[in-house]
Amino acid sequence: QVQLVESGGGLVQAGGSLRLSCAASGRTFSTYVMGWFRQAPGKEREFVASISRSGGSTVYADFVKGRFTISRDNAKNAVYLQMNSLQPEDTADYYCAAGAKQVATITRASWYDYWGQGTQVTVSS
């Protein structure tokens, strides 16, 4: 079992930035593909970004390319999501996920094995 705890969410005005953090338990953090998903009120959970075990590969949803950056620090058992140029439509609960599948990155929610409880991001206009 892997425990994931997100932090860094909050209220920000449109055009602002937030940096989300996800802290993972255990000694094998570097063996997991990591990802971020979000879920807005009344909508299904959607893929945001994923990063490979060593951090060498990343993939992003089209709607965040050029604005969001996923990164990881295996020495700290942490993954981050830097969010810039935030817009009201980015308002959602953001979730960190870890996957053990033998692939570089994962965009499908069902392929992840562990999930955090989420952190709320609210962007005001």
Image (cartoon, rainbow, N blue to C red):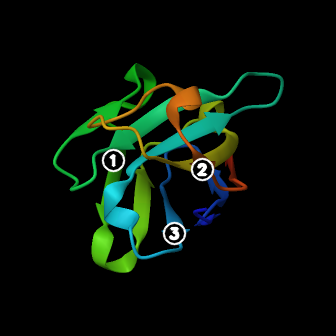
Residue 86 visible in this rendered orientation of the protein: no
Q: How far apart are marks 3 and 1 (CA)?
A: 19 Å
Q: Looking at the picture, how far across and down is residue 28, in whole percent?
A: 38, 68
First in sequence: mark 2 vs mark 3: 3
Instruction: Say what amino acid the circle numbered 3 marks.
Output: Ala
Q: Residues within 10 Å of mark 3 (few under 14, many from 20)?
A: many
Instruction: Say what amino acid the circle numbered 1 marks.
Output: Thr
Is 49 left, or right, of 93 in this rendering? left
First in sequence: mark 3 vs mark 1: 3
Q: How far apart are marks 2 and 3 (CA)?
A: 10 Å
Q: How crowded is mark 2: few (under 14 residues within 10 Å), some or many (20 or more)?
A: some
Query: How many marks can you see?
Result: 3
Q: Residue at x 41, y 37 (%)?
A: 49
To which residue does mark 3 refer? 24
Q: Quadrant of the C terminus?
A: top right
SS state under label 3: strand
Is 74 placed above or below 88 here?
A: below
Is 104 placed above or below 34 here?
A: above
Q: Quadrant of the N terminus?
A: bottom right
Instruction: Say what amino acid the circle numbered 2 marks.
Output: Tyr
Task: Quadrant for residue 59, please give it.
Answer: top left
Is 40 placed above or below 70 here?
A: above
To which residue does mark 1 refer? 69
First in sequence: mark 2 vs mark 1: 1
Nearer the observer: mark 3 or 1; the answer is 3
To which residue does mark 2 refer? 114
Residue 100 visible in this rendered orientation of the protein: yes
Nearer the observer: mark 2 or 1; the answer is 2
SS state under label 2: strand
